[in-house]
Image (cartoon, rainbow, N blue to C red):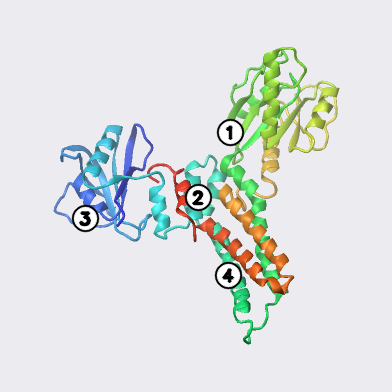
Amino acid sequence: MPDTIIAPASAPGRSAVALVRMSGPHALAVLKSVFQPKNPQRVWKPWQLRVGAIVDASGRPIDTGMAVWMPAPNTQTGEEVAEISCHGSPLIVELLLKAALAHGARLAEPGEFTRRAFLNGKIDLSEAEAVSDIVASETEASLAAAQRQLSGELSKIINDMRENLIDIAAEIEASLDFADDDVPPVDAEKLKQSLNQTSGEIADLLRQAIRGRRLREGARVVLVGRANVGKSSLFNALVGAERAITTPHPGTTRDTIEARLDLQGLPVTLIDTAGIRESPEAIEQYGIERTWQEIEQADLILLVLDRSMPLVDDDQTLLEKLRGRMVQGVGNKSDLPPAWQDEASWLSVSAQTGAGLRDLEGAICQSLAGEGALSEGALVSNLRHIQALEQAAASLESARDILANPQQLELAAADVNHALAHLNAIIGADVEDEILNRIFARFCLGK
């Protein structure tokens, strides 16, 4: 029989209200030991809040709060659950936890409530991981993507693919096991079509995965350009605060400066960098080296040029060095008379007046999200899921190649089963404890 676990479900520190959650077979018994209702004669009824006194391990009242008891199996974890709301004093929460521990509960491990929900069949593994993504969401778009995964959209797609592969594997196995009977040989072309259907669905998920990862983890957008083209001013304008020092003198920025912001639903880390130029100063040279390091890690580079000054050879050299990377050209200082014409793909902005900034934000999001709305189709964002899908795709490709030779059907069946195992791992249909430990260890305490 599992233990009864307890943990704070609210953030640590002082607050108006704190919530403590229990789950396990003795949740009600522990609740009765640490909580004394105002009307002790009333029987505890499920799903009904009761007002009363919270007591410590010795039975001494320490606070007044509310409590509710929820019987299994219709709870979040599938077990008996109890929750106590108290005033948000860390001392009260600590004394309440000690009292519950004294009466047989134990402290929950990170993610243990969600893990029990998974083990008790309330959610599958991909939905469990979505819980962690919801807690970590920084923007409405990333929250919407995590909620779609929690609602089971990804699970449904995976399960449909699994059903198709199970049918294919069963047909191949039947042909192998009953080759001497009246079972007709497999129709290799028909099986290839079925495999192609599943491979196409996997490819669709993987195409959306880049967008999903950026919604989940954010994207790195790096401002790059020669010294004194207004990168720091543009950085401040996009951030909406004077984060970077700006002066008329070239080389003011000697190091990278970062800011996290929400760009139309996309979590972005915006990085201001040192202007790229030849400089005898060791500190500025180090800053320029840091610029190139950031370029290597960037999801998108904003190449900033000064529209009010003629282009020079260094600008062209920089363009050549950035060729092959994802670059958005930005012509800054559009409030001044232009010294050159914009290219069609370049955006004119003024960090000074704010002109063109909304268009720039839109261009950044479009470049990073690709076609469609940010959260549209972004069901795969977890690296573990991406790797499993890639491995499943490779196994299906191998199975299709082998089907061309009817003498090697056993190998095709093995590849289909390998692909099935990778899909199973996404939803937790067959997953090792070591993987579960690694997944749930990243969760908050009390989730």
Mark 4 residue type: Ile
Secondary-structure class at tag 3? loop
Residue 418 horizontal/vertical position (percent): 60, 62
Residue 326 horizontal/vertical position (percent): 73, 38
Residue at the extreme left: 41
Sequence-first disc among 3 and 2: 3
**376 with respect to 331 (left or right):** left
Sequence-first disc among 4 and 1: 4
Secondary-structure class at tag 2? helix
Sequence-first disc among 4 and 3: 3
Residue 234 horizontal/vertical position (percent): 68, 26
- Give 106 or 399, whichever is nearer the viewer: 399
Q: Residues within 10 Å of mark 4 (few under 14, many from 20)?
A: some
Q: Relative to residue 257, is residue 378 depicted above or below?
A: below
Sequence-first disc among 4 and 2: 2
Quadrant of residue 46 in the image?
bottom left
Can you identify the residue that label 3 sits on?
44
Q: Marks 3 and 2: which is nearer the front?
A: 2
Secondary-structure class at tag 4? helix
Secondary-structure class at tag 1? strand
Q: Residues within 10 Å of mark 2 (few under 14, many from 20)?
A: many
Taking the spot 68% from the left edge, 72% from the top edge, the residue there is: 191
**41 with respect to 24 (left or right):** left
Can you identify the residue that label 4 sits on?
166
Can you identify the residue that label 1 sits on?
261
